[in-house]
Image (spheres, helix red, strand yellow):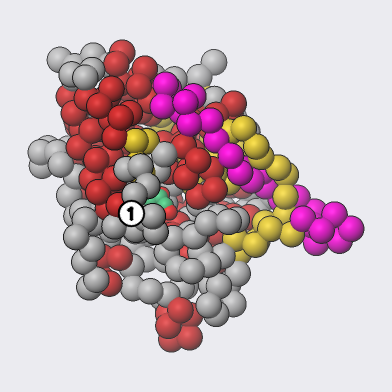
C-alpha cells in the first residue's frame, strides 16, 4: 500500500526536484503540499510550488496550502537576530549564481493555492486520518510542523513518521555551525525533536554524499522529455552556484539535491548506507552556533537517550538511478 504523504516545502530548486519526483514517481499518495518561508519569502515558495505542480500536469489533484510567513521567534529578539544572517534573499550579497532564484525556470502558473491555511489543513488531515497512517516529509524550515504540534497536542503522536531534510554533524551551510532549514527556525526544529514523533534526519552529511554531477545531468538530459529538461536546468543552476562555494576550485562540478534525497529515503531507506539512533537537539541559545544540530552520543549519559535517526552516508548511485528512472518513465501530454 502506498504511503500517505504530506510534503512541507520552501520551494527553491531542490524542493522542486523533490516535488516533481513525488508526483511523477507515483510511489506515494501525495495528500497535499504545504509551503513555508525559507529559501525565499512565502509568496515565492508558494508560487514556485504551484509552478512545479502545473509542470507535472497534476493540476487540482495536488493541492497546495501556504503556512508560516516567518519563523516562530528567531527573528524577534535582537540578540538571536544578530546571530541570524539575513535570509539569503535579503542578504544583499549576490553570489554570481544564486542557489535559489526568485522564480523557477517554468512558466507563470495558472493554479491557485488553497484558501485554507496550511497548519489548519495539516491538523485536520492528520487528526481525521487513521492514527499513524500519514508520513510527513519536511524539507524547509520546520515552522509549519512545529506550529501544528503546538496547536494540536496529539498531532505528533498521530503521525506515522517525519523525515526531515536538515541539520549536519560534520557539515554546515547557513552559518559556520548550522544548516539552513534548522538555522532559519531553530526553535521550531527543537519542538519537533522533542515531540516524541518518529523523526529521521537527512542532514548535509548524507546529501553531500549523493551529489549529482554534470555527467549525471548529461544522462538525464538525453532522456529528452520536459521533466529531464527542467531537472537539467535546475540542477545545473545549483552546480554553478556550488562551484562558487567549493574550496577546491578543481573539484568535479556537482551539487547536492538535498530535498530529493529525503523523499528517496522515505520510499527506499536503503539509499542511506549509514545511520544511527541518536540524541539530537538544536542550539537555541542565540550564540555563534545558533541553529546547530548537536548529537550527544555519550552512551553513559541519560542525555544521550535517542530521539531520532540521523543519516550519515548515502548511496549516490542508488539515488541517481531512482531519480533517472522516474524521469525516464514519466509521460508528458
Ligand atoms: O540546507 C539545505 C536545505 O535548505 C534545503 O532544503 C534547501 O532547499 C534549503 O531549504
Ligand atoms: Ca528546501
**Local crowd size for mark 1, using a 10 Å CA cut-off: few (<14), some (14–19), many (≥20):** few
Is 301 within the magenta? Answer: yes
Could you tell me which quadrant the C terminus lies in?
Answer: top left
Q: Is residue 299 left or right of residue 277?
A: right
User: Which of 299/131 is in front?
Assistant: 299
Residue 116: image location, x then y, percent: 33, 47
Q: From which residue to which does the magenta span run? A: 297-322
Residue 322: image location, x then y, percent: 43, 22
Question: Quadrant location of residue 192?
Answer: bottom right
Q: On the image, numbered disc 1 is attached to which residue?
A: 249
Residue at 52 percent across and 56 percent down: it is 171
User: Which of 239/276 is in front?
Assistant: 239
Residue 305: image location, x then y, percent: 80, 54
Residue 148 seen anywhere in this rendered image of the structure: no
Residue at 39 percent across and 59 percent down: it is 247
Is 313 within the magenta? Answer: yes
Q: Is residue 143 left or right of residue 277?
A: left
User: Which of 134/51 is in front?
Assistant: 51
Could you tell me which quadrant the N terminus lies in?
Answer: top right
Residue 27 position (above or below residue 248) = above
Amino acid at each position: 500500500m502506498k504511503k500517505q504523504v504530506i510534503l512541507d516545502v520552501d520551494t527553491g530548486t531542490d524542493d522542486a526536484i523533490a516535488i516533481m519526483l513525488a508526483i511523477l514517481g507515483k510511489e506515494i499518495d501525495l495528500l497535499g503540499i504545504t509551503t513555508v518561508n525559507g529559501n525565499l519569502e512565502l509568496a515565492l515558495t508558494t508560487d514556485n510550488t504551484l509552478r512545479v505542480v502545473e509542470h507535472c500536469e497534476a493540476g487540482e489533484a495536488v493541492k497546495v496550502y501556504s503556512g508560516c510567513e516567518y519563523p516562530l521567534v528567531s527573528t524577534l529578539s535582537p540578540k538571536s537576530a544578530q546571530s541570524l544572517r539575513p535570509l539569503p534573499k535579503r542578504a544583499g550579497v549576490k553570489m554570481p549564481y544564486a542557489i535559489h532564484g526568485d522564480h523557477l525556470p517554468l512558466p507563470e502558473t495558472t493554479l491557485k493555492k488553497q484558501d485554507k491555511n496550511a497548519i489548519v489543513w495539516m491538523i485536520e488531515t492528520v487528526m481525521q486520518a487513521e492514527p499513524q497512517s500519514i508520513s510527513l516529509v519536511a524539507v524547509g524550515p520546520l515552522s509549519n510542523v512545529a506550529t501544528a504540534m503546538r496547536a494540536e497536542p496529539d498531532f505528533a503522536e498521530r503521525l506515522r513518521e517525519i523525515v526531515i531534510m536538515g541539520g549536519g554533524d560534520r557539515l554546515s551551510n547557513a552559518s559556520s555551525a548550522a544548516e539552513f532549514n534548522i538555522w532559519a527556525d531553530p526553535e521550531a526544529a527543537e519542538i519537533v525533536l522533542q515531540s516524541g514523533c518518529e523523526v529521521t534526519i537527512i542532514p548535509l552529511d548524507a546529501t553531500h554524499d549523493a551529489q549529482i554531477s554534470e555527467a549525471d545531468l548529461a544522462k538525464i538530459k538525453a532522456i529528452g522529455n520536459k521533466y529531464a529538461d527542467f531537472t537539467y536546468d535546475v540542477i545545473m543552476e545549483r552546480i554553478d552556484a556550488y562551484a562558487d562555494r567549493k574550496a577546491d576550485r578543481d573539484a568535479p562540478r556537482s551539487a547536492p539535491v538535498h530535498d530529493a534525497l529525503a523523499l528517496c529515503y522515505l520510499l527506499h531507506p536503503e539509499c542511506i548506507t549509514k545511520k544511527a539512533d541518536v540524541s539530537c537537539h538544536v542550539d537555541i541559545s542565540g550564540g555563534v552556533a545558533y541553529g546547530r544540530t548537536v548529537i550527544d552520543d555519550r552512551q553513559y549519559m541519560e542525555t544521550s537517550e535517542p530521539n531520532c535517526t540521523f543519516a550519515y552516508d548515502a548511496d549516490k548511485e542508488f539515488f541517481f538511478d531512482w531519480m533517472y528512472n522516474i524521469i525516464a518513465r514519466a509521460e508528458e501530454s
